[in-house]
Image (cartoon, helix red, strand yellow):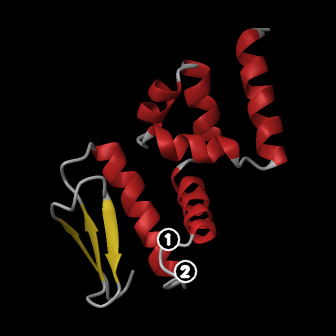
Amino acid sequence: MDGWDVIYAPLPETMTGMTDWRTRTIVIDPAYPAATQRSTRAHEEIHVERGPSRPPFDVDEELAVEKAAARRLIDVRDLGEAMVESQHLGHVAELLHVDPDMLTVRLRHLHPSERHYLRRRLEAKEDPC
């Protein structure tokens, strides 16, 4: 992210991060857990890569950004290993160092080949032979 700064500073309630196009700064609220900060940073970096949206806070753009951030942070093989260890989504998110919302987005938007991989990986866990 050439020419951009990332700073950690308090933000208004319910905001975990923001992108300031005028100052070319990403702001992350340090009051949130590390996994949320990591997820938020990836989300904001994707915004920077994609450029400003018109209108701001466009629902379709936010979903596209969230999907891209989830793919960037959660490799399907890592996801499979975490799911072998635990079926509890909160624990899986913790193992992957992301927040539960990021994990949910990743799971909802898996490519069919990724679904197939995860199904096979989880079946292999149940069949030790």
Quarter of the image that includes the C terminus? top right
Give amino acid for label 1: Ile
- Residue 94's x, y, as percent? 41, 32
* Disc 2 secondary structure class: helix
Question: Is 41 or 121 nearer to us in this picture?
Answer: 41
Q: Give me the disc on residue 35.
A: none
Q: Are marks 1 and 2 in contact (CB under 8 Å)?
A: yes
Q: Residue at x 58, y 66 (%)?
A: 59
Quadrant for residue 12, please give it: bottom left
Q: Give residue 18's position: percent from left, percent from top.
A: 33, 69
Residue 46: assigned label: 1
Residue at (21%, 62%) from the top-left corner? 11
Q: Residue 13 occupies which quadrant of the picture?
A: bottom left
Query: 28 left or right of 127?
Result: left
Residue occupying the point 83% across, 46% down:
113
Image position of 100 with respect to 43: above or below: above
How packed mark 2 is, by other alpha carbons closer than 10 Å (few <14, some 14-19, many 20 or more), is: few
Quote the CA–CA distance across marks 1 and 2.
6 Å
Q: What residue is drawn where x is 64% and y is 32%?
A: 80
Which residue corresponds to mark 2? 50
What quarter of the picture does the N terminus occupy? bottom left
